[in-house]
Amino acid sequence: MSDKPVFVTQPYLPPLDEFLPYLEDIWATKVLTNGGAMHQQLEQALCEHLGVEHLALFNNGTIALLTALQSLRITGEVITTPYSFVATAHSLLWNGIKPVFVDIDPVTCNLDPDKIEAAITPQTTAIMPVHCYGNPCDTEAIQKIADIYNLKVIYDAAHAFGVEDGNGSILRHGDLSVLSFHATKVFNTFEGGAIVCPDAKTKERINHLKNFGFVDEVTVVAPGINGKMSEFNAALGLLQLKYIDAAISRRKTIDAMYRTALRDIKGISVFERPAHGKANYAYFPILVEPGFPADRDSVYEALKAQGIFSRRYFYPLISTFPMYRGMHSANPKNLPIATDIASKILCLPMYPALADADIHRVVNCLGNL
């Protein structure tokens, strides 16, 4: 059994010799950015693959979140989750918007729709849920609330590439969905992201905003930002798409192996997958329960000592960081489920190149604690 380091995730890299023709095309055209041929091809290919009509590429998911909020002219307060990567809430602060944290569902780790209405105030303008670990939010319940109170819905879909519910792509819900193509994601372009848009007019505004507000050489219509994806990143994305189905299939196999192997370890809980739709197996989170011989942090350190680098994802909660913890909604008493799960969560290694032997190694380490 290998004793090489095993990380919680590793980027999938297609064969280098297959990437070289893409680079030669970029060098031949001398177009390195600003919506070149690779960029246009990737937008179209992603629309087809994901089953959406309009998609705008970005240099990363955080800039895409910032721009999504700008494009819908969101102000005031936005209801969101404390259980996410900090970029979710940071994008609100950078836009001068106050995040209002609401507790999560214990089964999905997503924003709990039953707790949203109590957090709505006259200043609330939107809801920003997260499809945590790629598990779909209760989009129907969230949309009903949004319709009643005339709120926008922006989904942080950083984990949700290729995820479907019973009726198709999860990305078709809400006013906008924002994807991340960071190197650690199921589909990556080294760095990158995208906004899935409902119509061509919205995409046009987003395209203006991600390119400094330019319409043409002499016309600027908005205080935009530089969010453009380079041709190099787009080329990697085009090549990645050729392998994405195989990569997700391998993730599914790894998921099944973990579930079987962990079944008899007392004190380790595994989340159930949604019964309908299509998963992408982005992460493999477990809960280290009180019945386990060691607490979560001790497990984390013990695995690390064996060269197994898991991640306490998401711990600490966003709401505990200095820029948020003074807010009323950040009080742990208001977030009991998120606080509890954050204290027990551990994401085990999950990526297509993870060997069967290393899966057994991870499980054996847990079983021997």
Image (tube, rainbow, N blue to C red):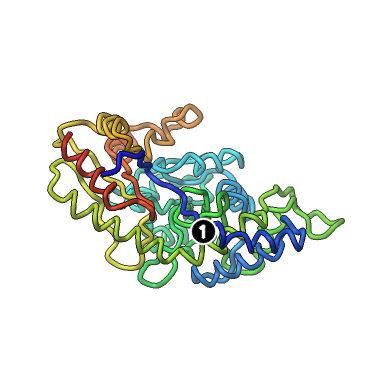
* 324 and 352: which is toward the camera: 352
Q: Which quarter shows the N terminus? A: top left
Q: Which quarter shows the C terminus? A: top left
For residue 337, what is the image quadrant? top left
Per the image, the residue denoted by label 1 is 15
User: Can you give x and y, in whole percent of width and height, for residue 178 in the image?
Assistant: 53, 55
Residue 266 in sight here: yes
* 355 and 45: which is toward the camera: 355
Q: Number of marks in the image?
A: 1
User: Can you give x and y, in whole percent of width and height, for residue 14 in the image?
Assistant: 50, 58
Residue at horizontal 48 percent and vertical 32 percent from the top: 324
User: Can you give x and y, in whole percent of width and height, for residue 124 in the image?
Assistant: 51, 47
Q: Which type of secondary structure does the marked residue at label 1 adopt? A: loop
Residue 151 in sight here: no
* 107 and 358: which is toward the camera: 358
Residue at horizontal 64 percent and vertical 69 percent from the top: 200
For residue 274, what is the image quadrant? bottom left
* 156 and 182: which is toward the camera: 182
Position of 200 with respect to 282 (left or right) is right
At label 1, the amino acid type is Pro
Looking at the picture, does residue 56 appear above or below residue 44? above
